[in-house]
Amino acid sequence: MTDLLIEPFRLPYMQRALLEVLLLGVLAGAVGVFVVLRRLAFVSDALTHTVFPGVVIAHLLDRSLLLGALAFGVLTAVLLTAIGANRRVGADATLAILLTSFFSLGVVLVSRTSTYTADLTVFLFGRVLAVDRADLLQTLALAAVVLGTLWALRKELVLRAFDPDGAAAMGYRTALLDLVLNLLIALVVVAAVKAVGTVLVVALIVVPAAAARLVADRVATTTVLSCLLGALGGWVGLAVSYVVSVDHGVRLAAGATIVVVLVVLFALAAAAAPVRRRLTARAAPR
């Protein structure tokens, strides 16, 4: 086990990839708790698709993929909050419209390139082993912004998640809180787009938080556990991908392997949850 978790990371490019997935695991794990509490998994999925045209446009113009994804991520968050507030349209319809239209635009744009298939694969599933120092610094900067905002607004966001009517009655601008959370989700997607692509990032956001929610009751405990599971899934998935691909000659995509490991961790949490509930019930005073 020590060789599995340590040996692959003696190489510089694997060290950079490990730092990237650890950062993303913590970042996505923290935001994912509020996504799960608010039942916004579909919002996260939509955002992973709506940033796609921004990534493609940035690639065609030879600009930063992060800036392209950021522009469309912010645009999506604003449109989602503004249009979704209209009761005649609703949040679900807004999500469907934005997801299909933006993603189709991205496919149309990338289909014009001569390397269509290769480019599409990279954009959708990422290339974590190609992460460089500049990418790490960008991820670190985004993580500081997102985690700092979550810390500053933690009480308001928790109140909005558990008692939206109470939050509105206390004078909080719930629409603004919704916009902030949508923007934070968009920033997580932007941070992860090069490493795991626009398709797999939703798993980083939802799966660790859902697993933590099964075995923890308090929001603070759930958040810490979600971050740990996200980082652990990234570490183990990256190591398994390297060992199986290099030592055994069976090629495994790093991003997809990370997601598989996260799902295994979720399954373990689901199996442990009933046991935990029984132990808690026995320990409770009668």
Image (cartoon, grey):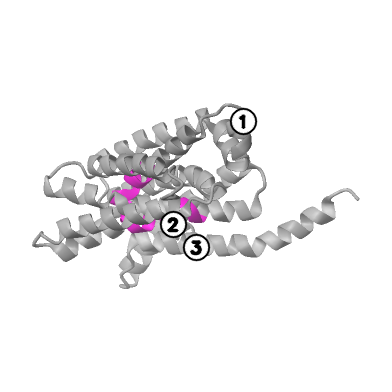
Outermost residue toward the right in this view? 286
Q: Where is mark 1, residue-wise?
A: 169
Image position of 222 with respect to 111: above or below: above
Q: Residue at x 23, y 51 (%)?
A: 53
Outermost residue toward the left in this view? 114
Q: Nearer the viewer, residue 252 or 216?
A: 216
Classify mark 1: helix, strand or loop: helix
Q: Where is mark 3, residue-wise?
A: 263
Q: Residue at x 32, y 67 (%)?
A: 245
Classify mark 2: helix, strand or loop: helix
Q: Is residue 223 visible?
A: yes
Labels 3 and 2 touching (C-beta < 8 A):
yes
What amino acid type should be assigned to the residue bearing mark 1?
A: Ala
The answer for how far apart the CA atoms under marks 3 and 1 are is 39 Å
Disc 2 crowd rating (10 Å Cα; few below 14, some 14-19, many 20+) is: many
Outermost residue toward the front in this view? 88
Total residue callouts = 3
Of callouts 2 and 1, the N-terminal one: 1
Q: Is residue 124 left or right of residue 226?
A: left
198 within the magenta span? yes
The answer for how far apart the CA atoms under marks 2 and 1 are is 34 Å
Across and down, in percent, residue 228 comes to 53, 47
Q: Is residue 235 visible?
A: no
Q: Residue at x 51, y 53 (%)?
A: 208
Q: Where is mark 2, residue-wise?
A: 203
Q: Which mark is residue 275?
A: none
In front: label 3 or label 2? 2
Q: Which residues are magenta?
A: 187-207
102 within the magenta span? no
